[in-house]
Image (tube, rainbow, N blue to C red):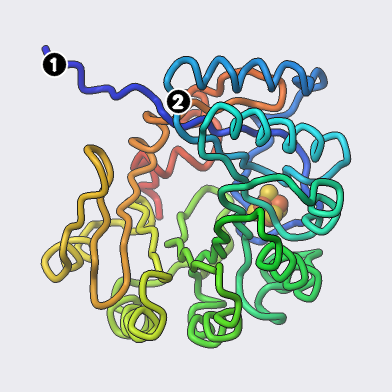
Amino acid sequence: MPNTIKKPHILLIAINDKCNYKCLHCDCSPQHISGNKKFSKKQWIKLINDFADYGGKIISIIYKEPLLTIQSRKKVAAIIMTAKKKGLRCGFINNGSKFKNFIQEWPNLKIDFVDFSIEGLKINQEQIRINSSFKSVEESICLANKNKNVKQINLIFTINKLNYSEIKQFVNYFARLNKINYIFDTWIPYKNSPPNFGISKEVYLKNIFPVLSSLGKKYPNRIILDFFSSSFRNNGLFKNIQKNGKKIKLNTRDYLIKYKNFFIRYENPLLLFQEAIIISPQGKIIRREALNKFNYLQDNFGYFKNK
Ligand code: SF4
């Protein structure tokens, strides 16, 4: 029988189990990432070297706020330095509150990508990402844009009922910064979902796709929609995308769909996690079965029958 499980080539690292925001739609369950004995900087360096020797390609530091403390920032910097020495692609996602500290502490660090989670301009950002300050996140994004060692910046915007009508304004606002790409995520329902956050496929077709399309025309190659299979109860919307879009193969395993001037990545979380190794702040491998059992990922696997 052919071996259908591909060798994981992505390492997803959770450095911290804490965050200073309380976002309405936070789906970072503490279940698998909390615990006292955290991996040391030395242990992370060894892990990165082992991952590179094993044939890994990409390291992404994710979950909670990786830049929250001076200790976690030191670990993030050590991971990136080691990864770069080994020729791996490496970056992190952050909420923008501590990036200024990080870049002041490590101004010469070469970073392949910095992702900022942001839900819109001031009002939407601050009402969805509780405790955040739009001004501070904007300053961080500008600093990243100015720093010549940061190669790529992605603004990650989860489309929901509160913010979808602001997409155009949001993109135009940040478009003055030359390194910015926009990654829009379809919102994934999970067990503690905020009420009325979801958007119907009719709204996507009538109100969201046309806006993304006109932005894609204005800003070529900068607009991506991550279409999560579990955001919708049936795949009628994705069938429409497949019918009207053009499939572009990126390599043997990944592809994009060019659809009405913007790009769509179809993300099946089950496959995503199959191809990645996820490590907790304590250095433990977080298995897919565990995620499935305890947190929102149960929805990703098609279990949200009651919704
Ligand atoms: S910034 Fe991320 S981890 Fe922190 S509360 Fe918001 S969604 Fe959760």
Residue at x 49%, y 67% (from the top left corner)? 181
Q: Point out the residue furthest to the top here.
A: 1
Name which quarter of the figure residue 77 lies in. top right
- The residue sitting at 68% across, 29% down in the picture is 33
Number of other residues with Cα within 10 Å of mark 1, as a class: few under 14, some 14 to 19, many 20 or more: few
The answer to whether residue 187 is above or below residue 217 is: above
Per the image, the residue denoted by label 1 is 2
At x 51%, y 21%, the residue is: 52
Observer-side mark, 2 or 1, equals: 2
Image spot of residue 163 (x, y percent): 55, 77
204 displayed left or right of 85? left
Q: Quadrant of the C terminus?
A: bottom left
Position in image of residue 165 (x %, y %): 49, 85
At label 2, the amino acid type is: Gly
Quarter placement of the N terminus: top left
**SS for callout 2:** loop
Circle on res. 161: none
Secondary element at image label 1? loop
Q: Which residue is mark 2?
A: 56
